[in-house]
Image (cartoon, helix red, strand yellow):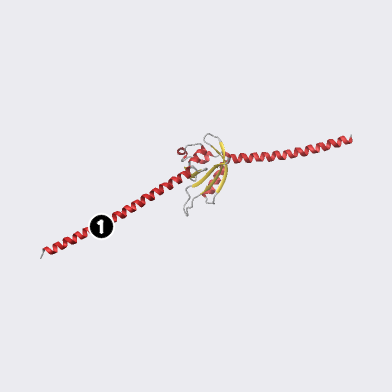
Amino acid sequence: LQAEPARGAGRKSDADTQRLLHELQVHQIELEMQNAELLACRDRTDLLLEKYTDLYDFAPVGFFSLDRQGRILEVNLTGSALLGVERSRLITRSLPRFVALPFRPAFLGFLAKTFAGAGKQVCEARLLKDDGKPFWASLHGDCPLSLGVLRKECRVAVSDITSLKQAQEAQRLMEALAVSNEELKQEIVRRQASEESLTNSE
């Protein structure tokens, strides 16, 4: 009579073990599926990061992240090429150092307004490459939103507008020459009229 309960308990124990094994197998499959999903997600993130890095580094303008003193915290490849300095050597250097002296006050004012959060700021200045060669630059500054927190860094996009400035200067010279040419024509007409008047009076 005592053997029957033991066999029943054994069958129950085997059933519990089988059920537990089945649950573990189901859980393992779920974990494998989650792992596959995480790996796919990581691959997508890596791809997006690669695209973002390409867009950032090879953008046609220089991107700078600056602190309040104008020290460079981050810069893309275009920005380092504009200043003629290797990117790793630009980090922590002062961007105002690359601004020609007559334009420094305007640049520092532009930086202060950018940090004040007064919207997007624009500034034109002559910058100097590391070798001292000057070029005209257009700077667009913006500060990321940080409600109630002192802004620690701002973003500045820098583009070389030397060709545009040269074209504007050439246009200004052409206009000045056209005005001068018109004045000369009028002077010639006046002189011819005076000569005719003298000839007639003689």
Q: Nearer the viewer, residue 2 or 170?
A: 2
Residue 189 in the figure: left or right of residue 130: right
Q: How many marks?
A: 1
**Residue 158, position in %: x, y?**
53, 43
Residue 73 visible? The answer is no
Quadrant housing the N terminus: bottom left
- Furthest residue toward right: 202
Q: Which residue is mark 1?
A: 22
**Residue 139, position in %: x, y?**
55, 44
Residue 189 visible? The answer is yes
Q: In the figure, residue 176 lies in which quadrant?
A: top right
Q: In the figure, residue 16 lies in which quadrant?
A: bottom left
Residue density around tag 1, few if under 14, some if 14–19, many if 20 or more, within 10 Å: few
Residue 167 in the figure: left or right of residue 52: right
* SS at circle 1: helix
**Residue 121, position in %: x, y?**
55, 48
Residue at 16% x, 62% y: name it: 9
**Residue 166, position in %: x, y?**
61, 39
Residue at 61% x, 40% y: name it: 165
Quadrant housing the C terminus: top right
Q: Nearer the viewer, residue 52 or 130?
A: 52
Residue at 64% x, 39% y: name it: 169
Q: Nearer the viewer, residue 17 or 157?
A: 17
Residue 29 in the figure: left or right of residue 1: right
Residue at 19% x, 59% y: name it: 14
Q: Is residue 149 above or below residue 85?
A: below
Question: Could you tell me the amino acid type at mark 1?
Answer: His
- Furthest residue toward bottom: 1
Q: Nearer the viewer, residue 143 or 166?
A: 166
